[in-house]
Image (cartoon, rainbow, N blue to C red):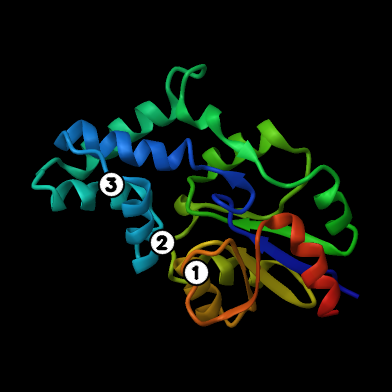
Amino acid sequence: MNKDLIVFDMDGVLVDVSESYRTAIQATVAHFTGNEPTRSEIQEWKNRGGFNDDWHLSHTMIRQRGGNTAHADVVDYFQKIFHGNGTDGLILRERWIAAEGLFDRLARNHTLAIFTGRLHWEARLTLDRFTKTVFDPIVGADDVTQLKPHPEGLLKICSTVEHGKCWYIGDTIDDASAAKAAGIPFIGVGRGHLGDSPFAVIDDINALEDVLAAHR
């Protein structure tokens, strides 16, 4: 019998990115406009949907503030401060959310995979820093032709992994929309705007086992 499949988003689900990606958005917009957005403003944009890509969001917020910076320049600056020189990048401020042993227990009866808005190598870099858990496959932004909320990444994983039941775990409206379009039950993390489609909502990833156990 095939194992059930759990596909995870990364940011806000596996990794706390409040001091990495969110700070990078603030710093990038401030650099090109002199006007730094608040965290609540960033969340409001995220809640609208269509802004899973932080480069796109940063560029859009810059344009909204009257800037005309090229998208490529926004990406270059964002990546420069996000990665730094390897010892001072914002990526090093990230925090792993899952409690020790969680994924070891889940892996006994589930195949664990990732569909993230990060680039594939960036996802791998962060996973290698925090865990020895095997997530396979990993589908990043550069592994698909259409980003979330399009379901391409989810469909790619589901079509290549033999499985029983399947869930997608995410924390944004774009994650929920991708799951809905793929016909996959969605478990939302956090209390942000998740649309009307969550199968269940949990405070953080450490409550996932209880939800799965209740719906076996």
Disc with the residue nearer the chain's start (3 vs 2): 3
Mark 2: few, some, or many residues within 10 Å (few <14, many ≥20)? few
- The residue nearer to you, when weighing 171 against 127, is 171
Q: Amino acid at mark 2?
A: Thr
State the residue at coordinates (76%, 47%): 134
User: Rounded to the nearest whole Å, what is the CA distance between mark 1 and mark 3?
Assistant: 24 Å
Q: Amino acid at mark 3?
A: Ser
Q: Secondary structure at mark 1?
A: helix
Q: Position of residue 16 (x, y in %)?
A: 57, 43
Pointer 3: what residue?
58
Is 146 above or below relative to 97?
Answer: below
Q: Secondary structure at mark 2?
A: loop
Image quadrant containing the N terminus: bottom right
- The residue nearer to you, when weighing 47 against 82, is 47
Disc with the residue nearer the chain's start (1 vs 3): 3
Q: Secondary structure at mark 3?
A: helix
CB under 8 Å between discs 3 and 2: no
Report the side of 1 relative to 164 (left or right): right
CB under 8 Å between discs 2 and 1: yes
Q: Which quadrant of the figure has residue 147? A: bottom left
Q: Given this view, does label 3 or label 2 mark the residue nearer the observer?
A: 3
Mark 3: few, some, or many residues within 10 Å (few <14, many ≥20)? many
User: Rounded to the nearest whole Å, what is the CA distance between mark 2 and mark 1?
Assistant: 8 Å
Disc with the residue nearer the chain's start (2 vs 1): 2
Report the side of 153 relative to 3 (left or right): left
Q: Amino acid at mark 1?
A: Glu
Pointer 2: what residue?
145
Q: Position of residue 189 (x, y in %)?
A: 61, 62
Image disc number at residue 152: 1
Q: Which quadrant of the figure has residue 200? A: bottom right
